[in-house]
Image (spheres, rainbow, N blue to C red):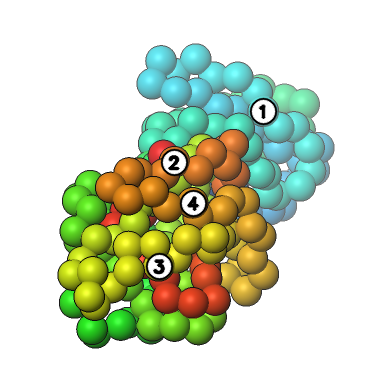
Amino acid sequence: MLLDMINIMGSVGVPPAPLFIEQKCKSHLTHLDIEWELVDYDPPVFAYVLELAQSDNNFIEVYRGLKTKYHLHDMQPNTLYLLRLHASNGGEIKNTSILEMKTLNIDLNNWTLSMSSIYPTAKAENTHASLLDNQFTTGAATDIGAAWIKASFPYPVPINSVTIAPLHKDPHLWGEANGDSGSLQYSHDNGTWTTVGTIEYVPMHHQKIIVGGITAQYWRLSHDGYLGTSSFIFH
């Protein structure tokens, strides 16, 4: 998120401050994409120097070169950073641009639920909230055939484990084992899916599937029969 941009320009004999291109500077979970305008000056600029600091204003140099964009990686989520940029032609440094950016926050409950179908007979809630309440009697239930229950995050998030559980409804209308032997899968593009775990339901018990720090935007439970879960919780 862009918060502020300050440009200090006009000192005689040194290049003007490069201007950050605000609409092209993007915040992500653990990286920042930075872009700025080319400086046309005589004598020519031989390097753009980008520096980074946090709240203590202790700047460190992270880039020096003639490109007008830079990818800052290995950042901390939900953290405010201060960027300082100047153009160098070997003379005194006076004109700088300063930009504040904040990396995105990790909210593992911030996802959208979608389902291949619903099975009305089960009388399941089929809501995001019902999959987060830790109740075995509320959740989501699909009809039979190529079934899936999907969580779509607004951006890729790092996941260490996923907790699921069987859905307990009227046993005459819904089987608590529905979904057993299905798969936990993730995708980067919502099209190609990779299986990372198997559904192994035990009545009235949660199952935690360890996935080991995979970063992906889309996660789903998949089964070729009826599919249900009372939990879909990410850690």
- For this rendering, which residue is in front, 8 or 99? 99
Q: Which of label 1 and label 3 is nearer to you?
A: 3
Helix, strand or loop at mark 2: strand
Instruction: Say which label, 2 or 3, has the lower sequence index.
Output: 3
Vertical position of residue 204 compared to residue 113: above or below: above
**What amino acid is labelled 1 in the image?**
Val
Specify few, some or many for label 2: CA neighbours under 10 Å numbering under 14, 14-19, or 20 or more: some
**What amino acid is labelled 4 in the image?**
Glu
Q: Which of label 4 and label 1 is nearer to you?
A: 4
**What amino acid is labelled 2 in the image?**
Lys
| Quadrant position of residue 102 | top left
* Residue linked to disc 1: 62
* Residue linked to disc 3: 178
Q: CA distance from mark 1 to mark 2?
A: 40 Å
Q: Can you say which quadrant of the picture contains the C terminus?
A: top left
- Residue 135 can be seen in this image: yes
